[in-house]
Image: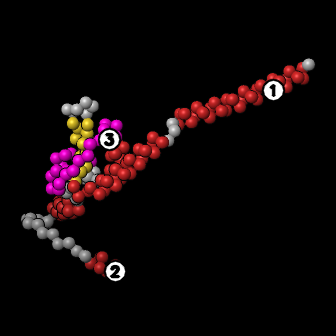
Amino acid sequence: MQEEVTQKTIALSVKTARVTADVLKNMLRKYLSGQKQKGKNPYKVGKQSYKELKSQGSGLSNIEITDGNIKSFERVAKKYRLDFALKKDSSTKPPTYYVFFKGQDTEMMNLAFKKYLGVQMNKKDKPSLMKKLMHFKDAVSKGKNRERAREQQKDRGQSL
């Protein structure tokens, strides 16, 4: 195995009058930049502009969402690696937003929306943290008041 790795070679050719260190350095730099470009995906993934999404050549579908839900939806879409674009429709009051996504991603989109709706419903069902804190704060303060009252009553009884 190690022999195979050490015996791999690369053939590069260049026309030059004299082979210098600078020429070799430039050749290797061009080769490595070409290798980087080869591995890159030409399409963007995740949130992108409408134009970029449309240029990928697949049919688009859309869903309407409200302003408050945009950021939380982006988190879920990123988790499911969805390609989507947001477009704002200012003609309505309040403005509405459309989420455009590839037609082939409809199943993933449905799955992401189910997850998103589940998260939103859980947020509504949870009681407020501030309400919980106020409840416990009141309970603790009532307990301290009872102890004070007991101590005062004991003190009164002994003084007589």
- Residue 51's place in the image compared with 89, above or below, is below
Q: Name the residue under label 2.
A: 1
Q: For residue 57, which quarter of the picture?
A: bottom left
- Residue 70: mark in rendering: 3
Q: In which quarter of the image is the N terminus?
A: bottom left
Q: How crowded is mark 3: few (under 14 residues within 10 Å), some or many (20 or more)?
A: some
Q: Name the residue under label 1.
A: 151
Please identify the residue farthest to the top as the structure is shown: 160
Does residue 132 appear in this view? yes
Does residue 25 appear in this view? no
Closer to the camera, 138 or 79?
138
Front of the two marks 2 and 1: 1
Disc 2, disc 1: CB below 8 Å?
A: no
The image position of residue 27, as x and y in percent, is 17, 63
Closer to the camera, 81 or 40?
81
Closer to the camera, 124 or 41?
124
* The magenta segment: 47-69
Front of the two marks 3 and 2: 3
